[in-house]
């Protein structure tokens, strides 16, 4: 069970999606997850560390797919964890499945560099 106070991660809901993700001036890395998902729990600490390391460069948020099914359906989330990168209100890339933190950081850097 993660503590919502221990990190800078914003837990986004259907109501806050537009403001937190689509209208963000920073690129946004979105972790689509669920409580019952083992791989999601493995990814959680890496995502939290990234929110600290990338502060000021990339906003890191989490979306619980069970509580926010509308968003998950809108973006075609079929398996979790799914991690999507948004820039300027649009999805620019996505990666699916658990991976080490370094893999996600490289994914973000490569995408934002135009690779």
Image (tube, helix red, strand yellow):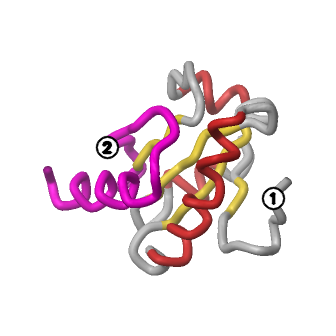
Which residues are the magenta region?
86-115
Q: For the residue carrying disc 1, how many other residues have a C-alpha within 10 Å: few (<14), some (14-19), or many (20+)?
A: few
In percent of the image, x 83 and y 65: which residue is there?
3
Q: Secondary structure at mark 2?
A: strand
Q: Is residue 104 left or right of residue 71?
A: left
Q: Quadrant of residue 79?
A: top right
Between 67 and 14, the one nearer to me in the picture: 67
* 52 vs 59: above or below: below
Q: Is residue 105 magenta?
A: yes
Q: Is residue 30 left or right of residue 36?
A: left
Between 64 and 14, the one nearer to me in the picture: 64
* 114 vs 36: above or below: below
| Between marks 1 and 2 in the image, the one whose residue lies nearer the viewer | 1
> Where residue 76 appears, x then y in whole percent?
51, 21
User: Marks 1/2: CA distance?
Assistant: 28 Å
Q: Is residue 44 magenta?
A: no
Q: For the residue carrying disc 2, how many other residues have a C-alpha within 10 Å: few (<14), some (14-19), or many (20+)?
A: some
Would you name the residue on which mark 1 appears? 2
* 34 vs 57: above or below: above
Q: Is residue 34 left or right of residue 27?
A: right
> Where residue 97 appears, x then y in whole percent?
49, 34
> Where residue 88 appears, x then y in whole percent?
36, 55
Would you name the residue on which mark 2 appears? 92
Labels 1 & 2 near each other (Cβ < 8 A): no
In percent of the image, x 40 and y 37: which residue is there?
95
Task: State the residue lying farthest toward the left.
Answer: 115
> In the drawing, what numbered circle is on residue 113?
none
* 9 vs 44: above or below: below
In percent of the image, x 63 and y 37: which residue is there?
39
In percent of the image, x 64 and y 47: which residue is there?
42
């Amino acid at each position: 069970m993660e503590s919502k106070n221990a990190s800078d991660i914003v837990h986004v809901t259907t109501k806050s999606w537009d403001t937190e993700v689509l209208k963000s001036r920073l690129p946004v890395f979105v972790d689509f997850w669920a409580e019952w998902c083992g791989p999601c729990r493995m990814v959680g600490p890496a995502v939290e560390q990234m929110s600290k390391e990338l502060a000021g460069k990339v906003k890191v948020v989490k979306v619980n797919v069970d509580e926010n099914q509308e968003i998950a359906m809108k973006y075609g989330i079929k398996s979790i964890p799914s991690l999507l990168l948004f820039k300027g209100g649009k999805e620019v890339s996505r990666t699916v499945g658990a991976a080490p933190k370094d893999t996600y950081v490289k994914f973000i850097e490569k995408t934002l560099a135009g690779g």
